[in-house]
Image (spheres, rainbow, N blue to C red):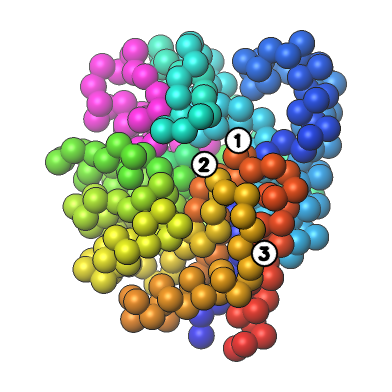
Amino acid sequence: MTQVVATTPGLFPLPDWAKDELADLKGHQKSDLVSGDEGPEVEAAYDSAREEVIAGQRDAGLDRVVEGQLRWDDMLAHPLAVHDNVDTRGIVRYYDNNNFYREPVVEGDLSADGGDVAAELGAAADLVDDGLQAVLPGPYSLADLATDDHYGDEAAFLDAVADFLVEEVREFPEVETLFLLEPSLVENPPADGEDERASEAVDAVAEAADADVIAHTYWGAIEEKTYAHLMDAGVDAVGFDLVSDHDQNVYNVQEYGTKDDVALGVVDGQNTLVEAPETIRDRIDWFEQQTNTAYDTVYATANTELFYLPVNKFEDKLDALANAADLEEVEA
């Protein structure tokens, strides 16, 4: 019998009060919000916002709770943007949408620098008894979003980014799951030869985690060869964006198989229309029927990060995901 686990890929929208308060504290300087050198008032605002979004996930009834990544103003580039050997330069477009981030330019070794993400997770762990989920950019996507001004070789740079994430993961508190977000596997697929290295980089990060690891891809479907290589990585599940391209994702699974567990992007993280729990369940059931498989675990999630949404719609979508998982339990 399939277990449906309601979760999210994180990167939540800041509560409205926090947006206003942080803008005021930082003098409306967006670039300072994730500088890593924040005063006590700013830290207190983020702490309060973290408590609010964790409580919101608990109230909604999600099975996995994330820290929220509210400080990640540079989105998936954040772990590099706060590194001592990285210079954040001009504003660049975040994939093909109207969001922007500061370009992280790596100018020195990506050695461990204190575990910025691990520290945030530690603060979340104090508020969550069980079901804590970590969120990280996957190594291929993080390398894709960054610029290398130090290593001088794409393969060496990808390895260095993977090693950096491995050290970050080793600093984590106890977590049940880790979502590695890999939209670049879809948006900027690796070339021949690079696809195997990308899979090996994902594998290295997954190997470091004492948790179930999901490599979540979105904004479409992965090219067949890249998907076949990703299946070699030691992750517990691959995530599929059924909102953007359900047919090609199903084809990949039909043709190449997948893990015993699967993550399904069944809620639109960029559209304010709120899906009914029954619609979410129908999408999960449809995927199982099309792939002729009853999975051990289905992670029901939004297809993308959620910072695109107004706070009220974001909260409604959390409720819908949790209620969809409850529907599965009732029907079983």
From the viewer's perspective, tell me whether residue 106 is left or right of residue 247. right
Q: Badge 2, how many Cα within 10 Å: few under 14, some, many 20+?
A: many
- For residue 164: magenta? yes
Could you tell me if the residues under marks 2 and 1 are in contact, i.e. CB atoms within 8 Å? yes
Q: Hey, what amino acid is under mark 1?
A: Val
Q: Nearer the viewer, mark 1 or mark 3?
A: 3
Secondary element at image label 2: strand
In the rendered image, residue 95, in percent from the top left (x then y), is placed at 42, 32
Secondary element at image label 3: helix
Q: Badge 3, how many Cα within 10 Å: few under 14, some, many 20+?
A: many
**Residue at the location (36% across, 46% down)?**
202
In this orientation, which residue lies closer to the viewer: 246 or 197?
Answer: 246
Q: Nearer the viewer, mark 3 or mark 2?
A: 3
* Farthest-out residue, front: 273
In this orientation, which residue lies closer to the viewer: 152 or 312?
Answer: 312
**Residue at the location (49% across, 58% down)?**
265
Residue bearing mark 2: 136
In this orientation, which residue lies closer to the viewer: 294 or 223?
Answer: 223
* Mark sitting on residue 320: 3
Q: Hey, what amino acid is under mark 3?
A: Ala
Residue bearing mark 1: 117
Read off the magenta span. Answer: 140-169
